[in-house]
Amino acid sequence: MARYLLRRLAALVPTLILVSMLVFGLQQLLPGDPATILAGEDQDPNVVAYLRQKLHLDQPLPVRYLYWAGGVLRGDLGESLRVQKPVTELVLEKLPVTVQLASMAMLIAIVIGVTAGVVSAVKKDTAWDYAANVFALWGLSTPNFWLGILLILLFAVRLGWLPASGYVSPFEDLKGNLAAMIMPAFVLGNAFAAVLMRHTRSAMLQVLSADYVRTARAKGLSERVVILKHALRNALVPVITLGALGFGELLGGTVLTESVFTIPGFGKLVVDAVFNRDYQVVQGVVLVTASAYILLNLLADLAYFFVNPRMRG
Amino acid sequence: MMRLWLAFALSVAASAAAGQTLRIGLAEDPDILDPTLARTFVGRIVFAGLCDKLFDLDERLNIVPMLATSYSWSADHKALTLKLRQGVTFHDGEKFDAAAVKYNIERHKTMPGSNRRGELAPVESVDVVDPLTARLNLSAPFAPLLAQLTDRAGMMVSPKAAKAAGEKFGAQPVCSGPFRFVERIAQDRIVLERYPGYWNKAAVHFDRIVYLPIVDATVRLANLRAGQLDFIERMAASDVPSMKSDARFKIAKVVEIGYQGITINVGKSDEAKKTALGRDARVREAFELSLDRQGIVDVAMDGEAQVGNQWVAPTSSWYAKNVPMPKRDLAKAKQLLAAAGAPNPTLTLMTPTTSDAQKIAQVVQAMAKEAGFEVKIQSTEFATSLNLADKGQFEAYVLAWSGRADPDGNLFSFHACKQPLNYAGYCDAHTDELIKASRSAASTAERQKLFEQIAAEVVGKARPIVYLFHRHWLWAHTAKLSGFRVVPDGMVRVQGLKLN
């Protein structure tokens, strides 16, 4: 176990270096001059020249990379030129918001998706199964922004139960925080629940027809124990992989939902930064997201160890 | 006992009024909150609550006193003497005086990255005549100077705080406006609180202002409807009818000082020579004649704009009446194209991806086709489009300008030779002379005359920009809010605003 962990951790280093190069390099492919867009409406040539120098845009690409990578190693991700704030600070400010949103969405997705998947597999070809499938199709085919706006119009404008948009820190007002986050979390979770449901269903169907399940039943175990302990546990292996990947996706893919609900999270930060060519912010945020993604994958691999005994050998 | 109750009721009423918060929904997240470095339109809306200026604008765009109570020009118009308001303090308690004016103008002119340098270029030095009198010495007469001082160039920050914070001043701005800075969470909120030492306290009726950037117009409006916002700027034109019928809300609108137009590459790069549109002024005239401006406004803007053919709206006192708006004339357009030897010119119209710009491009495409133009729409993300325009890699470009109070701000940088916003690459020695003369002309009548001559050249002949219309600034607010002043610069002045 320890050796496996060390090997995996060692492999992280070159991956992260490669990722940092990709993050930096790909951004250079963005059309448009960041100095021009940051110079704003007036396009004063002095300001453009000043920004170009400040951003090291007058230096060759490898030099610029080293400036940035050096900073990253010291824990300095640079500074947002648009709002004059260190990127590290922005990341620390926005990351918890998106992590909370993604976690709530994930929880909603798991509760709805896995339950619906198990039910539809166990009750295959019954009304339960059809209902779960219709739900999955609905979840997959509903655009996030549309569902978001509809929920706002219903729950905020018409019924007045929830705030239309915005964010309150849970440390300031936990109730207000949950009220503000429930709609966006549902919108995000809803789509992912559908994916989880489909995967759980097919994995469960496969496992339920396996020999050891038949053996378990033959041993006289109750159906509840057979399904929850024997079948679901094994069926969860692919679902966990999907969940880990999905969580990474949720972290990076909250953009539309964050925009609709005006949640000041990671997604909105990076999209605004791309449009404003606030390079330092884009680089910092993408690097942190990519690292999180890689770590989550590692955690998923480790989770297999605990869930599936066959992998420990 | 009765008196006690009365006192209690009064104190409750007073604290309710004093404890009020005004929540304003913005269409974008502002940039740096430092008047010297600030670059965006939306940032100016926040400054309206935070930083007072030397002068302000009224509803008719007249220049009115703010931190300066009066001004006088020297006989040669090369010195502007300002009398300053007494008893004004900055949010850190420091005194506002002529030395502060000198510091601020010099900061605008010398700070690295300053966006105000160009606006104050002719100001050579500032003299402190006495504590309440400052004199700005100019290298040459400069008519737009007073108007510049009604915007960020005229905003005064605390010299002590600015010196201490250096280039980080924008993170904790200290000005002398009705509200002082409390906190900013990027993309989430900017919070200001009432400054008790404000010189015009009587006009301030809120304890706090919270500015919330909500980019999506539908969501911004939903927040207003749900009661989470009191005021929103830039409401979508398509929402006007439904809001008009809702008694809980009020709409305010005014014709902007900016414009929407199509910039044509007439000399920015060699590409200009490759197209009939760039080469031949007759083709550009035909292009203009193929367009029905009111039709564009009706379809693309839901009627919420004022058609126009110049850098200022026909409703402006600076509009050049000698170059009236031409009506759509397909026959004449076809004639002109035939005369130019290009009966079916093709042109690529670079269009930012905003929905307004896309709609405009589609209507223009359909209209111009009837005169023989083959218009291809090239949808381009804004930052990229700006870069292509700067390099001259475009034929025609759908571009808007937020506008400046003085017409020079809509004219000089766009039509004078080699100016940064002259994406058309238009450069004509005679027009250049006229534009320069208009900047140093002393009287309004003289400037007006020069603008007419410039309009005859630019709008009547060369057409590097085909102006289409001037949008309506559309604001919506709860009907309980009163005292909003509708000024064409699109700002939200918080003095006088009150929740009843």
Image: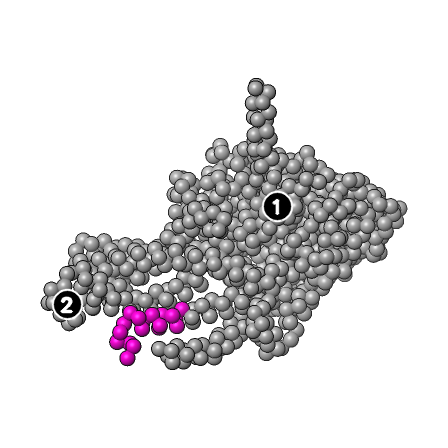
Q: Which residue is most to the front?
A: B1
Q: Determine whether the residue tagged by mark 2 lies in a helix, strand or loop.
A: helix
Q: Determine whether the residue tagged by mark 1 lies in a helix, strand or loop.
A: strand
Q: Is residue B459 left or right of residue B230?
A: right
Residue B218: x and y in percent read 47, 47
Please state the chain letter of the residue tagged with numbered disc 1 in the rendered image. B
Tally of numbered tags: 2
| Residue A271, disc | none
Q: Is residue B362 magenta?
A: no
Label 2 Cα neighbours within 10 Å, binned few <14 / some 14-19 / many ≥20: some
Name the kind of residue labelled 2 in the image. Answer: Ala
Q: Is residue B32 left or right of residue A271?
A: right
Which residue does the numbered mark 1 point to in the structure image?
B192
Residue A270: x and y in percent read 51, 62
Residue A256 visible in the shown view: no
Which residue does the numbered mark 2 point to in the structure image?
A216
